[in-house]
Amino acid sequence: MEFDIIEQLLGSPPDAPLWQVAATANRKGVLASWLSTVVARDIPITVGAQEYLERVRRRVATLHGVGAQVRDRTGVTVIKGERIARHMPPWLIRNSGDVDLIAEDEQMLWRTVIDLRDSYGAIAQSVSVLRTPSEQHFVIAMKWPAEEPLLDKPLGADIATCAFCGDVPVGAPIRTAMSDDEDIRELHTVAEERFQRKFSVKDLLDFLVLSRRLDQRLDQALAHRIVAETMEQRRTPELLNLIAKTRSWVDLGAHWDGIERALASAAPAEKARRAERADELPAVYYGYPLDTTPHPGMAAEFHRIDDLDLATTPIGTCLLLSGEELMLAELERAQRAAASLAG
């Protein structure tokens, strides 16, 4: 990995002053990664920048440790985070905002959530429910304070019962199966980020690291594996977009030329399939936590009180919303309903 890789992905001119590159890296969310490349080149940085960099290093180490500890205690699968960072050179920091965990079933999900609460003081920010006619999945976001709680984003963990949540607006379905090849699996987790936002410089860096590793590992077998599994995952347009964005800044090599062409040929069919198969898409309910009163068992129970949908769970009661807006009067009624369920 080149020492100037972040500058390449930022599109910074080779002669740009450090302060200008720093401003761009900060705006693009990769300041710590860029600073780590500056230190690797033995370029002096200020005391404040060094303190920030060391704090980020500790944050990343903490989150990697949380992922390993929770996995060992509960059996969940850790994705992204340390699984990608391990393939980066030791001098390059991959900043992390949270730990991403996949549970095999609902019982494992709640055991994991309770473990995070009891071990790290994490609290639930949201409890989302995704329902199709044939299945139901949960996605739970947990947060707890960072080392510097008034300056840095909280530490977090996202726990889900599906590997890929998809996206209702673009018609991408939920996928529960993951590739047997960990590197290909992580490639798809990066592509999945497109459903949350436009690809960031961090996503491009993740993809670049994974693409180079897969090049080395699979060589001539690479194109067939990537194309076949991406089509099976129904993520062809997203991976194609990720390849194109990364290629605009960094050369990916001959193998990825062929992969890009194959995905470009397959993408229109996937988009048409999405438009035709609305029945595959889940109804999404955003769970707004109302209290932390635990309910017995390791499964959520659903209640309809007047026109309100609520779920009682092992970590408390939440109001289920079909949209992201919540009016004060609705919240007050939901809190009274939650109190009645708590008994």
Image: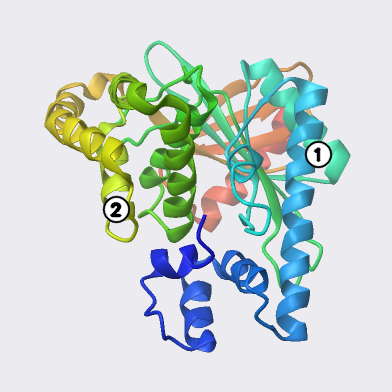
Q: Position of residue 72 (x, y in %)?
A: 80, 25
Q: Residue at x 38, y 19 (%)?
A: 132
> Would residue 297 be found to the left or right of residue 196 on screen?
right
Total tally of numbered discs in the picture = 2
> Would residue 104 be found to the left or right of residue 58 on screen?
left
Label 1 vs label 2, nearer the camera? 2
At mark 2, the secondary structure is: helix
> Callout 2 environment at 10 Å: few (<14), some (14 to 19), or many (20+)?
some
* Colouring of the image: rainbow
Q: Which residue is mark 2?
A: 247
Q: Residue at x 74, y 47 (%)?
A: 63
Q: Position of residue 107 (x, y in %)?
A: 69, 16
Q: Residue at x 50, y 82 (%)?
A: 23
Q: Position of residue 172 (x, y in %)?
A: 30, 31
User: Toward which corner of the image does residue 91 lie, by quadrant?
Assistant: bottom right
Q: Position of residue 110 (x, y in %)?
A: 71, 25
User: Toward which corner of the image does residue 46 lie, by quadrant?
Assistant: bottom right
> Would residue 11 be found to the left or right of residue 144 on screen?
left
Q: Is residue 89 above or below residue 75?
A: below
Q: Residue at x 32, y 61 (%)?
A: 249
Task: Point out which mark residue 284 bears.
Answer: none
User: Toward which corner of the image does residue 57 lie, by quadrant?
Assistant: bottom right
Task: Point out which mark residue 117 bears.
Answer: 1
Tell me if residue 145 can be seen.
Answer: no
